[in-house]
Amino acid sequence: MQKLAFIGLGVMGYPMAGHLLRAGHQVSVWNRTPAKAEAWCREHGGTPAGSLAGAAANADIVLTCVGRDSDLEEVVLGRGGLIEGLRPGSLLIDHSTVSAKLSRQLAEQLATQGTGYVDAPVSGGQQGAINGQLSIFCGGSAADIARAQPVLAAYAKAQAHLGPVGHGQLAKMVNQICVAGVIQGLAEGMHFAAQAGLDVEQVMSLVGNGAGSSWQLLNRHRTMNAGEYDHGFAVDWMRKDLDIVLAEADNMGIDLEITSQINNFYKDVQAMGGGRWDTSSLLRRLQE
Ligand code: NAP
């Protein structure tokens, strides 16, 4: 059993923190909007931590799941942030999807005060978080990962140590590249099927049993066909992730033509008012 603090009780963090408690850890929580931390404590017991630094000061391991680079920076380095409370010998595990560059910077800065760092972005969406079935991409030193992995087991379907700090984020970028292409392919297939006068449901259930199948097809084609786009990961978050991917590819001097094009397609969806629609809304764009 470990003394843990969980920061960021959003769509992902709220259920993840619950799994840690059920795994037998002592968990204190903090959320920027206090009502969410109060709701979590009403459901699971305990009282919310009074401050970020206070939460960190009482924990062996602090876990974060916030938004974009600027949010994580604020939570860790901002006034009253985690850095003011983290003890020597403690460990910060970050589940947010952010740049590898920021992960390395935070790890370096925290190392000066004896705090370890693991970047551990996740895949599996809201459903994966609720069911404790996430894929976790871990970057960090062998010693920090050995400390982190038994804790992460509370909500991991799969987890792996991919290299030093930043490698977890790089691997999550691979995930986002793969997902973007698959969704666009699925959207084009469904659009083609409809335009050809085929029964879209019938075709997709056959495709789903063959080589054209994918998680996206199996889990999203019915909702896409019904024009429902409120089933998980939002377009605004995907745009954040693809911007991170494309900046990293640019640094490497490689061209991700399809990913770059799909990022522009998602800009179109945002312009259609779909920033909070789920990522399968690429089909709606084709239907405009
Ligand atoms: P979310 O529901 O929007 O929740 C974000 C959480 O971060 C909230 O608790 C929010 O606090 C907190 N937060 C954001 N900015 C903050 C700041 N500047 N200071 C303090 N707290 C801040 O997001 P989510 O879906 O849980 O996603 C969280 C992270 O996981 C993101 O990096 C996302 O890309 C990644 N992710 C999401 C999914 C998914 O399917 N949703 C899947 C994989 C990875 P408030 O309550 O005060 O707003």
Image (cartoon, helix red, strand yellow):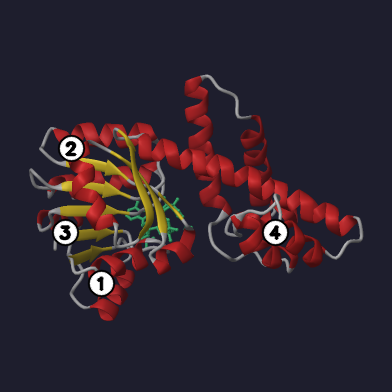
* Within-10-Å neighbours for mark 2: few <14, some 14–19, many 20+: many
Q: Amino acid at mark 3?
A: Ala
Instruction: Name the residue nearer the viewer: 37 or 166.
Output: 166
Q: How many angstroms separate mark 4 from mark 1 (CA)?
A: 36 Å
Residue at 65% of width from left, 30% of height from top? Answer: 257
* Residue drawn at 21 percent across, 78 percent down: 45
Residue type at mark 2: give it: Leu
Q: Which mark is drawn over residue 55?
A: 3
Front tag of 2 and 4: 4
Q: What residue sits right under mark 2 in the picture? A: 110
Residue 138 seen in the figure: yes
Q: Residue 143: x, y in percent?
A: 17, 40
Disc marking residue 37? none
- At 62% from the left and 56% from the top, the residue drawn is 216
> Please, what is the three-letter code of the amino acid marked with disc 1?
Arg
Q: Pick the residue in front: 177 or 103.
A: 177
- For marks 1 and 2, the one nearer the N-term is 1
Q: Is residue 109 left or right of residue 240?
A: left
The residues bearing labels 3 and 1 have C-alpha atoms spaced at a distance of: 19 Å
- Name the quadrant where ligand 1 sits: bottom left
Gap in Å between the C-alphas at discs 1 and 2? 29 Å
Q: Classify mark 1: helix, strand or loop.
A: helix
Per the rendering, the mark at residue 22 is: 1
Disc 4: which residue:
208
Around disc 3, counting alpha carbons within 10 Å, would you say few (fewer than 14), some (14 to 19), or many (20 or more)?
many
List the single residue furthest toward the right. 197
